[in-house]
Amino acid sequence: MSADAASQRLEAQFAFLNEADRLKSVLRATTLVDGSRPENSGEHSWHLALYALVLADQAAPGVDINRVIRMLLIHDLVEIDVGDVPIHSQNGQAHASEATLAAEAKAADRIFGLLPPDLSAPLRALWEEFEAAETPDARFAKSLDRVQPVMANLMSGGGTWATYNVTYDQLEARVGSKIAKGAPGLWDWVRAKARPWFG
């Protein structure tokens, strides 16, 4: 690789990394566990990577935890353009609406497109795998993405459940069913902790 090509590659790599820093400015509906302030999406992504490392024993046989961690580190980069769309907002309809999904795909084009093609294509594919949640790795990653806000809500006195008047049935449908697909033992434990909060 020529010095010019190497310099251009580094320009692209740092353009992506500098853009990714903006994720730290995207505020989520979920608060920190102490309830003191909203967490940002950069903090959320880091925390999920730690969840994968610590809760790896909850994954199905054959799940590649290193892939799961990579997936979780990039899964919310599209929020730089789209923002956080809370799963419990507007009865949960906005979270997976066609408009939101289209906006996220457009954001993925732009953000991953900053990288050199040999990095852009595999990271974009990893993001798409997470979104589809059809592989064992992605199902486990998606489960952790749903567990972490539940734990934050429990620790902060209800958090977004109180804000959005969430019912237990809504929690089961929007969150529990996703967790159970990738980490059924984890949902059994978390459900037992969450159920009393709903009376």
Image (cartoon, helix red, strand yellow):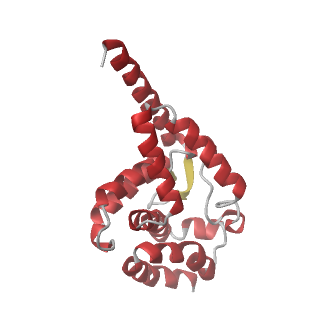
Residue located 28% across and 64% down the image: 54
Q: In the rendered picture of this protein, how many numbered marks are placed on residues?
A: 0
Name the foreground residue: 85 vs 77.
Answer: 77
Name the foreground residue: 146 vs 182.
Answer: 182
Residue located 62% across and 82% down the image: 169
Percent coordinates x, y for residue 139 in the rendering: 44, 67
Residue 33 figure quarter: bottom left
- Identity of the residue furthest to the front in this view: 1
Q: Does residue 125 sit above or below 142 in this rendering?
A: above
Tell me the quarter of the image containing the N terminus: top left
Percent coordinates x, y for residue 18 in the rendering: 45, 30
Residue located 57% across and 82% down the image: 198
- Res. 126 visible in picture: yes
- Res. 31 visible in picture: no
57 horizontally vs 73: left or right: left
Q: Does residue 19 sit above or below 125 in this rendering?
A: above
Q: Does residue 169 sit above or below 182 in this rendering?
A: below
Q: Does residue 5 sit above or below 161 in this rendering?
A: above
Residue 69 figure quarter: bottom left
Residue located 50% across and 38% down the image: 112
Name the foreground residue: 82 vs 136.
Answer: 136
Percent coordinates x, y for residue 12 in the rendering: 44, 26
195 horizontally vs 63: left or right: right
